[in-house]
Image (cartoon, coloured by chain):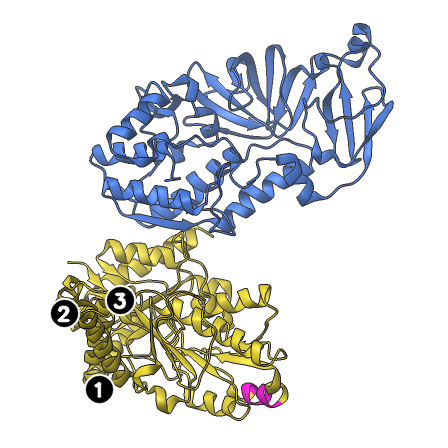
Chain colours: A blue, B yellow
Amino acid sequence: MSGGVDSAVAAARAVEAGHEVVGVHLALSRMPGTLRTGSRGCCTIEDSMDAQRAASVLGIPYYVWDFSERFKEEVVDDFIAEYEAGRTPNPCMRCNERIKFAALLEKALALGFDAVCTGHYATLLTDENGNLELHRSNALAKDQSYVLGVLTDEQLRHSMFPLGASASKDLIRAEAEARGLAVANKPDSYDICFIPEGDTQDWIADKLGNQTGQIIDREGNVLGSHEGSHGFTVGQRKGLQIGRPAADGRPRYVLEIRPKTNTVVVGPQAALAIAEMSGERFSWCGQPPASTSEWRDILVQVRAHADAVEAEFVVQDGVMVIRVKQPLLGVAPGQTAVLYLGTRVLGQVTIDQTISAVSVELEQGLV
Amino acid sequence: MPVYLDHAATTPMREEVLVAYLEHLRAVGNPSSVHRFGQDVRNVLEAARESLASSIGCNRSEVIFTSGGTESDNLAVKGLYWQRRVEDANRKIIVTAATEHHGVLDPIFWLEQHQGAEVALIPVDRNGVFDLGWLQQFVEQRGQEIALISLMWVNNETGVIANIEKITQIAGLAGIPVHSDAVAAFGHIPVNFAESGLAAMSVTAHKVGGPVGVGALVVGRQVKLVSLTHGGGQERGMRSGTMDAAGASAFALAAQISVSELPARQSKMAALSQQLISGVYGIAPDAVFSRGEALGLAETVHFAFDGCSSDSLIFLLDAAGVSVSAGSACTAGVNRPSHVLLAMGRTEAEANGVLRITLGHNTSESCVAAFLSAFPQAYAAAKKAGLASK
């Protein structure tokens, strides 16, 4: 229980369904005990107290379990290392993959629990053979199946998502209100919980330090300099501070980050569009598909709040390759591509490489 | 029925104390008012002061009522430090131990950060025993710079008992005032302020069967300290604010009962704690009894269990109907590796898997039996969970 409205209502529904429920708040910060205002984090005293109060209203026991060390190793350090390698990570997915449905679940099973129940907006269904399938939430606007794409069949077997069938967040808030839960009107949190000020670039720069490097175009022409490639993300437009305008006068975007040489590659927006993405780190959510050696039509979603687009995928030599039917913007190495069959989550891959839909020659042709 | 074995956190109010407390809570009157209502309440307060002084072995004017242990510790540490700095600006060293309660440690570190204090930590051995040879040497070398010494009488986590008379003897050679947090000692071992040689001593009601929210700082008659709260000048001008006569009276009664029945209770506690300790060793032979062979409080049983985490053990025992603690909790309720065990030279892993089982005035053999019957399964599952989370 994070101290938010979703996990409080999820707990309430689990209690109502007749389960024996214990509320657990995860202490994830190495420096607990900060009472932050504004931008909220996972481990403020206020959140812990909100979770405790909700558990108390529901009449269930409540404990705080400390996963701060695991969280630092598996999520925070991974986040920094990914930025250092020029990729754009999703720490919430790592947290689901390695903390909530791994460290917490393992501990819970060892202590005699059957499942971890969370307030994620996603739906668990059982197919005709009794296999579990993860589907999008009925509340499509709040759907969080994307961040659960990392869950394996074994993890799904020990998961419960009681909010999946709800039509909207407003209904959840109304239900919380009706149940006497004081968190009914607590604002949603959007920030990365371990970055208190909400400014990722500043936070990363603080961790990794500054080092001057070059900004170049795709032909290798030096256009300017920067204070550290980790301060950029693919698709970024602002803050490039390139003196010379592009030949066509159009704005330039970050196309690629080369951490080894501390170089940032920029170009026109059209060149951002990718045709293909691939990665070695993939997993299946529930039952794996019967065959993956032939190209197969799927939908792919590359960010938590992006639309799913038509694509096809194949697994070749241990690498998952995804080709989108239309050039796709907003894809950077480090992001997770989640594969859907309709509303069902099929699996996910962490993107290692992308292939632009627009070659250098074409780009020059565009000028 | 759930069994409570966390008496060092707080112990139930005794029935006779509760009855007397409720009766005094009904009375109206500010003890500082001159009319009959005020005088009646003042009489209750002063009778309580006299009775408490007798239980503590001090003069009645030496009892300064406060809201509890933490306030008493703050008043002693900051009040003595400021007073000593006023008298002699060179005295800025505070001698304490890393095993102290946060009620003492945090004001001292605050003085270090904000008021120019210099902190000297007395070394402790693996059992948590202060190195008094070091103290002797340090006082001989830098006695003229020491503002005060603050060392607890009984450690709230491990139960280890300090040799307070020896400490005040060493400090006395250089005229250094000694404060002791005696919250875990008073009512549990014989404590006599006059004989201790202390300048100030913190005590609290809810560890001896009185209510939460009332305590006292015993301040020697000759000792001066700067007040933290300014106002009506109550309590020798050291603690302004309307006095809580009902609380003081309940504290005094609880203290009187605790002290008078101490010899009988000590032998009962020793027998129960022996059962508990040998029972734990029977189930977990590699458990480490935290204070080792050092002299300690019988009712405080503190163990470290390799490969278990405290929060798993506490959860499993709680679910099985036995409530114990790890000895330290932060405001958010997160179990942290005990700073006391870390200060005793234990590793973070060792300090992470501890249990503090503390007995109290209403603990019976059946409570100990309930713990020992719940413990094997909890221990096995916590070990399994500990391995899972590695």
* B48 up-or-down from A330: above or below: below
* B320 up-or-down from A226: above or below: below
Residue position for label 1: B263
Dot 3 or dot 1, earlier in sequence: 3
- Say whether residue A173 is left or right of residue B373: right
The Cα atoms of the two marked residues, 2 and 3, are separated by: 14 Å
Given the image, what chain letter belongs to the residue carrying mark 3? B
* A178 up-or-down from B387: above or below: above
Q: Amino acid at mark 1?
A: Pro
Alpha-carbon neighbours of circle 2 within 10 Å: few (<14), some, or many (≥20)? some
**Residue extent of the magenta highlight:** B134-140
Q: Main secondary structure of the magenta part?
A: helix
Dot 2 or dot 3, earlier in sequence: 2
Q: Which mark is residue B244?
A: 3
Q: Amino acid at mark 3?
A: Asp
Residue in the image at 69% along x and 36% along y? A85
